[in-house]
Image: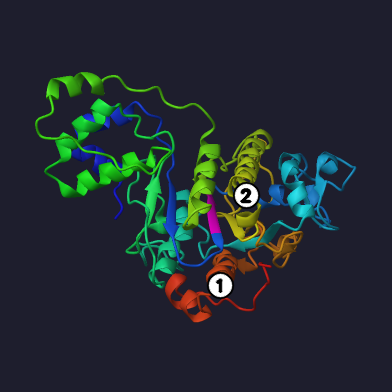
Amino acid sequence: MTLSRRKFLTRSTLLGCSLAASPLITPVSFAAAPWDRRLVVIILRGGMDGLDVLRPYGDPGYGGLRTTLGGGPLGDGPLSDGLVLDGFYAMPPALAPLMPLWQQEELGFVQAVSTPYRARRSHFDGQDLLEAGTVGLGERHDGWLNRLLQLKTGISARTAFAIGQGDLQLLQGTAPASDWSPDADLLLSPQAEQLAGLLMQQDPLFTSALAEALALSRDDDGVVGLPEPGDDMQEMMAGAMEMPKPQRGKAHLKLAEFAAEQLRGETRIASFSLNGWDTHSRQKGALTAALVRLSDSILALKQGVGASVWDKTAIVAMTEFGRTVRENGTGGTDHGTGGAMVLAGGAIRGGRVYGRWPGLDEASLYNRRDLMPTGDVREAAAWVMRGLTQTSQSDLERQVFPGLQMGQDPGLLR
């Protein structure tokens, strides 16, 4: 069962006022499953510039296309601050905290990939297609992670509640999954909990959803008690106005830390999104901030799950499309096509860049402006799921990613 923020607030005005006092951010979603290995999918919203995150300094055309954004050979120009990965690629200084993972072969990349989305370059359509996992828009209304769960038996959900700025389509569908948003924590006093319960006691759906949400907001696994009919309404109204102060902290770290906590237990799949990848202007600063958040999130996941779980965890970070190969006049890049994926985790065979490099000469570009995609972003995700969950290739191609041809196993996992 999935309950959207809009529906929840519409059904309970008073509780909505209480929740409005809390900072509501992008939700993180979970699903428990009977296999042992873990999968974390991070959606990088905004169109990450794969040519700046994974700089192809070995291509002779790169320096001329990127004169201020990581261009030029090592030691000559802006790329002199880059972190060399191999004889062809480097990554920006903002990802320096992840260099030990690269050296331990727990960090990798897939370059020159995209969804089947082309030409129009709309964030909304691009993200919808990325999360739907289909060839065309509007073909399915569930997400590809949920379709994976639909193929499995023994699937259970911890809860079914979501509050946040937007719903994550990846885990939407008929298979059970749960949603949680940090800092919603519902932040209700005991009196407010009772009042909300009274308001919803005639509606079993919302009574159950409230109980599950309150249970998730606590550190223990205690059962939330709903009020008795005889409780004093005036006293509860007064208590409801005494809202606890919102917790402070970095939202992306709360997402990662809570995900890690769940992954240590029965949860096997977690997904969340990170914003800030739309870099039309002043890309150097904006991308640095976004990469720091991504780096922090990956390291928080590693620390949070612990060594034994990290060894069987795969993190897949993906974006709706790449960006133009040429810089624009405002120190940024515009919406493009081919982009990059980031892979991390003890289950990943890292220390390498996957994918076929298409080249940067004008004849090799897509529409003479974008990096030409040589791979499907769904293909890499499918092979990761194949290795983690033992789902058959035919099911992945027909059910999870309809219309996909997975091709040969690239060996992304250990």
Q: Nearer the viewer, residue 314 or 140?
A: 314
Q: State which quarter of the image contains the C terminus.
A: bottom right
Callout 2 environment at 10 Å: few (<14), some (14 to 19), or many (20+)? some
Dominant secondary structure (helix, strand or loop) of the stretch shown in magenta: strand
Give the colouring mode of the picture: rainbow
Q: Which residue is under mark 2?
A: 306
- Looking at the rendered structure, the kind of residue marked 2 is Gly
- Can residue 20 be seen here? yes
Q: What x and y, as percent, mark residue 196?
A: 21, 34
Query: For the point 35% across and 29% down, which residue is it?
Result: 187
Q: Is residue 59 left or right of residue 346?
A: right
Callout 1 environment at 10 Å: few (<14), some (14 to 19), or many (20+)? some
Q: Nearer the viewer, mark 1 or mark 2?
A: 2
- Above or below residue 194? Residue 321 is below
Q: What x and y, as percent, mark residue 122?
A: 47, 51
- Looking at the rendered structure, the kind of residue marked 1 is Arg
Q: Is residue 378 left or right of residue 146?
A: right
Q: Nearer the viewer, residue 284 or 179?
A: 179
Q: Going by the picture, which residue comes out furthest to the left?
A: 230
Query: For the point 70% across and 58% down, which residue is it?
Result: 108
- Highlighted magenta segment, given as a residue range: 39-44
Query: For the point 76% across and 47% down, which residue is it?
Result: 99
Q: State which quarter of the image contains the N terminus.
A: bottom left
> Is the C-beta separation of discs 1 and 2 under 8 Å?
no
Q: Is residue 317 magenta?
A: no
In primary-sequence order, the first of circles 1 and 2 is 2
Q: Which residue is under mark 1?
A: 386
**Secondary structure beneath label 2:** helix
**Secondary structure beneath label 1:** helix
